[in-house]
Image (tube, grey):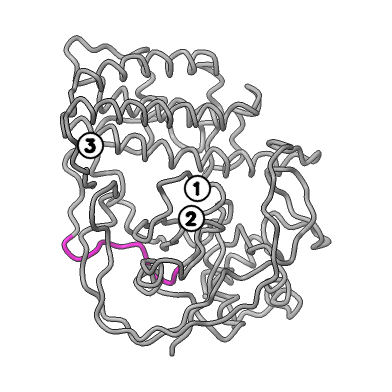
Amino acid sequence: MMNTPETQSGQAAGEDLLERYLDVRRATLVLAGPLSPEDMTVQSMPDASPTRWHLAHTTWFFEHFLLSRERGHRPYREGWDYLFNSYYYSVGDMHQRPRRGLLSRPGVDEILAWRAQVDQRMAGLIEGAGGDPQTALLVTLGLNHEQQHQELILTDIKHALSLNPLKPAYRDDIVLPAARQTELDFQAFPGGITEIGAQGPGFCFDNESPRHRVLLNPFKLASRPVSNGEYREFMDDDGYQRPELWLSDGWATILQESWRRPVYWSEGLDSEFSLLGEIELEPHRPACHLSYFEADAYARWAGARLPTEAEWETVAAQPGVLGLGQVWEWTQSAYSAYPGFRPLAGSLGEYNGKFMSGQMVLRGGSCATPPGHVRPSYRNFFYPQARWQFSGLRLAADA
């Protein structure tokens, strides 16, 4: 699951871990800060969750997997295990995901009070552990788990606000980086036997390991993700009306959902919904919120393909070659186990391994990804029809 760097003393390790714990927990509250209690209760679709549920679930993780090990532990409230468990069936049953938005109680103030109590107890636990490796491992996993939910807070509230006819902004003080027009070039790579997977000190999820060898044929990879303007050309060429460009399941989704444009683009194709509200559609920004089906269809239309995750990681591991963190980039790789993969023991083994069916891998990171999650070996994964994440594409081709 993770490698931990050596420290000079257990006390120093504990102090660093506590500081990181408090920083991550504060960052979650900062993200929730612009939202009203009403905002935090909305669930706009089964795939998304209310902000207040994210605040509670990440707190439940620390209470259940760490604080419950303390002698005399009692949960903050009876029954909250059921409300705020996500998918750990070996722990117990849970309130079903599509119905999270029906939970008006406990209220936001109660959940925030619970967070404060858990943070106080966790500070004592971390300080008392004296750099114990098992405690450090569990705390670090919990913090990376919380950072994943920080990104989900943004993606989920963006979807919810987009359904409001007034198109309200999550925040009105976000400064977008300047969009620059750059030529799309392809760089050739020789292929051969290489290694992918996590290595060295620092955290990684279990699905990033073990590091292993792969054989690559010579290939080319684009210098940047596909832009809004380039995706518009695909649309102008009737891309959404041409079944020969689409995978069978993708075309079935087109017909069923009546897709004709990316999810947040206006009908007039001149604006898009963002965390700033409705903004002008900038042609030079990366095309975003595309499903795997849309990314794959565009690649076919462009006479190219999506990269494999092994191709993508091999290039990303070379410093300065790829500019990461704009949009998650779909790969053509199905989410599956690496050779020799072993899930974590116990309930935490449900974290990644059991989802290795029917989903596709994305690589890189996005404007909503917290620091520490943008690394060459990180494997994100979603179902191919998912569009509410900050997902785009980078083209590849055989050399």
Q: Give the left or right position of residue 114, taking residue 138 as reference.
A: right
Q: What's the residue type where badge 2 is placed?
A: Gly
The answer to which of marks 1 and 3 sits earlier in the sequence is 3
| Residue contact between numbered discs 1 and 3, judged by CB atoms under 8 Å | no
Between 136 and 145, the residue placed more toward the observer is 136
Report, in whole angstroms, how far the alpha carbon at label 3 lies from the one at label 2.
Answer: 23 Å
Examine the residues drawn in magenta and state their main secondary structure: loop
Residue at 23% across, 44% down: 349
Which image quadrant is residue 234 in? bottom right
Report, in whole angstroms, how far the alpha carbon at label 1 lies from the one at label 3.
Answer: 22 Å
Q: What's the residue type where badge 3 is placed?
A: Leu
Find disc 2 in the rendering and name its residue.
365
Between 162 and 317, the residue placed more toward the observer is 317
Mark 1 burial class by Cα count in 10 Å: few <14, some 14-19, many 20+ = many
Q: Which residues are magenta?
A: 331-340
Find disc 3 in the rendering and name its residue.
137
Mark 2 burial class by Cα count in 10 Å: few <14, some 14-19, many 20+ = many
Q: Give the left or right position of residue 89, taking residue 167 as reference.
A: left
Find disc 1 in the rendering and name its residue.
369
SS state under label 1: loop
Residue 36: x and y in percent read 66, 24
Asked if one can make out residue 258 in the rendered structure from this viewpoint, the answer is: no
Residue 133: x and y in percent read 16, 34
Answer whether residue 337 is magenta in the image: yes
Mark 3 burial class by Cα count in 10 Å: few <14, some 14-19, many 20+ = some
SS state under label 2: loop
